[in-house]
Image (spheres, rainbow, N blue to C red):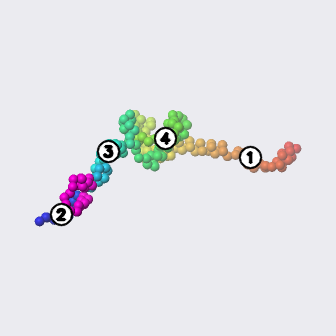
Amino acid sequence: MAEAAPIGLSWAPKLPSLPTTSGGKESGPSSSRAQESLWKPGSELVDGLFVPPRDPRKSNKMSRKNVKDTSGKGWFDMPAPTITPELKKDLEILQLRHVLDPKRHFKRAGKSKALPKYFQVGTVIEPASEFFSSRLTKRERKTTLVDEILSDQHLKNYRMRKVREIQDIRTPGGNQKWKNKGKKTLKRAKDRRK
């Protein structure tokens, strides 16, 4: 008498049913066909388990998919991070850093406007000698580079001054917009000269 298995602990292999032959003994070739139908090579599940492919091309392709995306041995296999909206804004600000401050000049990263694929983000830790000179206070520290730049008062004044200069250049000057245009302007000019 077979004992009843406890709940959740029974297991039976999932095998396809064997084809039955009518009458007589099984011949050699038909039995081998039945055995081939049980096990199928490739990336199919056998008994609920993954069987790796025997083809070396397929196995190489699968191993390439499993390798993480890195920059290579020359850059110590630096991984490609997932780009969040905050990181994207920070990278765009870094590409436009030559616009931020007129006193500093930076070498351009290149002609391409695409964001870099491989990079790392770190935190600058100042030494004790820079406690009074170039240290950021807790109030000046922000979560992202964009927030720090927007809250900096010197850069804010510079941006406001540049916006005013551009507006002054682009707006018409003097009383040019009130001048009369047409044939009568010459007549008025002659009357004013008399």
Residue at image x 26%, y 54%?
33
> In the rendering, which numbered label is found on residue 176?
1
Task: Give residue 182's position: percent from left, percent from top.
Answer: 80, 49
* Local secondary structure at mark 3: loop
Residue at mark 2 to residue at mark 1: CA–CA distance? 96 Å
Which residue in the structure is indicated by mark 2? 6
Task: Please give the range of residues in magenta.
Answer: 14-38
Instruction: Look at the numbered discs 1 and 3 and tell me whether their residues touch, using CB distance below 8 Å.
Output: no
The structure residue drawn at horizontal position 78% and vertical position 49%, both measured from the top left corner, is 181
Instruction: Indicate yes or no whether the magenta region holds residue 152.
Output: no
Mark 2 or 1 closer to N-term? 2
At label 1, the amino acid type is Gln
Q: Compare marks 4 and 2 and give the one earlier in the sequence.
A: 2
Mark 4 lies on residue:
94
If you read the primary sequence from the N terminus, does the residue marked by circle 2 or circle 3 appear first? 2
Labels 4 and 1: the sequence-earlier one: 4
Residue 55's label in the rendered image is 3
Q: CA distance from mark 2 to mark 3?
A: 41 Å
Rate crowding at label 1 as few (under 14), some (14 to 19) or many (20 or more) other CA atoms within 10 Å.
few
Gap between marks 3 and 4, in whole Å?
47 Å
Amino acid identity at mark 4: Leu
Disc 2 and disc 3 in contact, CB within 8 angstroms: no
Picture coordinates of residue 63, whole percent (x, y): 33, 43
Left or right of residue 180, residue 111 in this image: left
Assess whether mark 1 and mark 4 are in contact (beta carbons under 8 angstroms): no
Cα–Cα gap, marks 4 and 2? 63 Å
Q: Mark 3: which amino acid? A: Asp
User: Residue drawn 70% across and 44% down?
Assistant: 173
Mark 3 and mark 4 lie on one chain; the one further toward the N terminus is: 3
Which tag is nearer the camera, tag 2 or tag 3?
3
Task: Judge whether 112 appears above or below 177 on screen.
Answer: above
